[in-house]
Amino acid sequence: MKKNLMIIALLLVSITSFSQSWFYEEKQTDFDGFMKAAYVVGTGEFPYSEPLLFVRYEEGEINIALTGTVGSYGSRLFIKVKFSEESDILIYSVASSNSDYWVLELSSEQRKAFVNKLKTNSYISVRLCSENRSDDYKFTLSGSTKAISKVGL
């Protein structure tokens, strides 16, 4: 009996110690060149159950984007952001979008500050909104420092 409990305990420890909420990928394509990305799968309201928040470094530029949020938002789209350890709600416009891919419009200085907040908070809440609708998403930041550092930031 003790042996079985020990095996279960070791399995649980190994699963929790080696799991990471954030992921890192890099790839090379003939069309886009070399790209590095760190991303996390978040939670959202049904049916948007697997939104992605990612930080991508491509051709010398950093992009922070949200995807997996299928829906029609109309015009004047913006994103509200609330980091766990901060009281401020930040509001960003969207630089480019299609029905499932939203890039935050940030200056170079804002991008650096945003990435730093991703590394130092425990979660981020995001509201994608327009005059027609709004949807809320939440992303853990556990493991973000390691994954974002691999991107080179």
Image: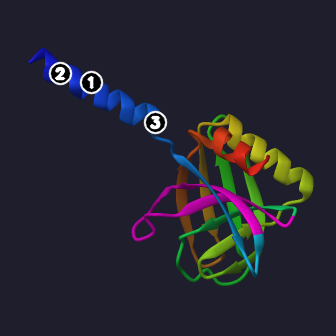
Highlighted magenta segment, given as a residue range: 34-59
Mark 1 surroundings: few (<14), some (14-19) or many (≥20) residues within 10 A: few
Q: Please say if the residues under marks 1 and 2 sit with CB atoms less than 8 Å apart.
A: yes
Mark 2 surroundings: few (<14), some (14-19) or many (≥20) residues within 10 A: few
Q: What kind of element bears circle 1?
A: helix
Q: Earlier in the sequence, mark 1 or mark 3?
A: 1
Colour scheme: rainbow
Circle 1 residue: 9
Magenta stretch contains residue 48:
yes
Seen from this angle, which residue lies furthest left?
Answer: 1
Residue at 46% x, 36% y is: 18
Q: Please say if the residues under marks 1 and 3 sit with CB atoms less than 8 Å apart.
A: no
The answer to whether residue 99 is above or below residue 113 is below
The answer to whether residue 8 is above or below residue 42 is above
Magenta stretch contains residue 121:
no
Residue at 14% x, 24% y is: 4
Circle 3 residue: 18
What amino acid is found at the position of numbered circle 2 in the picture? Leu
In the foreground, 131 or 118? 118
What amino acid is found at the position of numbered circle 1 in the picture? Ala
Task: Tell me if residue 72 can be seen.
Answer: yes
Secondary structure mostly seen in the magenta stretch: strand
Q: Position of residue 108 (x, y in %)?
A: 91, 56
What amino acid is found at the position of numbered circle 3 in the picture? Phe
State the mark number for residue 5.
2
Q: Quadrant of the N terminus?
A: top left
Task: Tell me if residue 86 can be seen.
Answer: no
Q: CA distance from mark 1 to mark 3?
A: 14 Å
Residue at 45% x, 68% y is: 48
Q: What kind of element bears circle 2?
A: helix
